[in-house]
Amino acid sequence: MRLHLTNVTGIGASKLLESLLPVIEQNKLMKINCIYLPNKGSLMNYKSINKFTKICIYNRFLPNLVSRFLECTFLSYKFNGPDPLLVLGDIPLRVKCSQIVFVQQSHLIKPNVFNWKISYFKYIIVRLIFRLNLNKVNAFIVQSNIMKARLEGSYPSTKGKVYVVAQPVPIWLLNSGIKRAARVNSNKSNLQLIYPSAAYPHKNHKLLSKINPSDNYPISEAIITIDKNLNPSPHIPWVKCVGFLTPIELIKMYSKVDGLIFLSKEESYGFPLVEAMFVGLPIICPNLPYARNLCGAQGIYFNPDSQKSLLSAVKKLKKILDSGWWPSWDYQMKNIPSNWNIVAKAMIEITFNSSRVKKLN
């Protein structure tokens, strides 16, 4: 089969594929004939482990939205071929071959309330392309049952074609050996929290801008992985924007912080939540379906539109940690694959079986 990831340039999606691509290539069920890579981001430098696999960089000379529209419509013929195409970048192509699409982008879901901001205009175009090419797809792969229900609700013609394949934490964290069972800092001191996130609007950093300096947050430090110049609340001394953290730096942080604070209002999965559960950290997260689905009864929830609700959740975490509580994620982690080989095998089998059904029809 062939792998298409020309538009996977975001940090989160790139991290996922850096763990997934090598194990797909190592799997003996299928041979990877060609990998179509982006011309920017960390994956542009991906090296195949198979010397017979062809690597094709997809160069873009127009603005990304225009280039993507053309790639997925009028220029899709470039990706025609006899072998199945596993598209790892959310958007179906208008191709004449078996096609399986891995959907991570939650903005493909039709919103309950239309957002008139210009920054959301691109999602209108993306949803249009997605709908236009639906009939060219054999199967869709998503990361959770919540995302499956939302995708089928937004695009009824996908019913019966959507498969759920959850993902474990990145390989670098799987191999780290970190297992937390208590606070590292002195008991009853203020909390040190971390929020791994990129500077996207749906990550909800603006909630921190509503914090009043007089509010008594029991936080000594909240580490956020966005650039300092994007700090949403420079008036709050405990908000620390540190920029991008490497895997080694994240491992160090996970080894010492008291918990994860997650603000995002829109996720198809929520990788930092899975990472925190794997490590064993307490989690403060929005009272939204994606977070409830992952974290269950052990999560500490708040209203993502209310600063007062966030304050209440932080105080609750401080109180129960002071009492000796620590979360157990064993039940929730039963639903998460233990390694990436399981994920690769599932995706390959879906690709093979759905392509075979098309040939038989």
Image: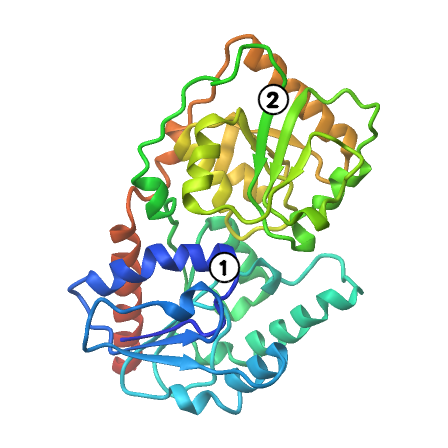
Indicate the quadrant containing the C terminus: top left, top right, bottom left or bottom right: bottom left
**Above or below for 29 versus 225:** below
Q: Position of residue 77 (x, y in %)?
A: 43, 91
Answer few, some or many: residues within 10 Å of disc 1's Cα (few below 14, many 20 plus, some between 14 and 19).
many
Q: Quadrant of residue 115?
A: bottom right
Q: Quadrant of residue 5?
A: bottom left
Callout 1: SS = loop
Question: Mark 1 = which residue?
Answer: 104
Which one is in front, 298 or 228? 228
**Is 62 positioned to the left or the right of 95 in the image?**
right
Q: Quadrant of residue 191?
A: top right
Task: Name the residue located 25 percent from the left edge and 70 percent from the top edge.
Answer: 352
Q: Position of residue 183 (x, y in %)?
A: 48, 18
Task: Name the residue located 64 percent from the left edge and 49 percent from the top edge.
Answer: 227
Callout 2: SS = strand
On residue 191, the disc is 2
Which one is in front, 250 or 116? 250
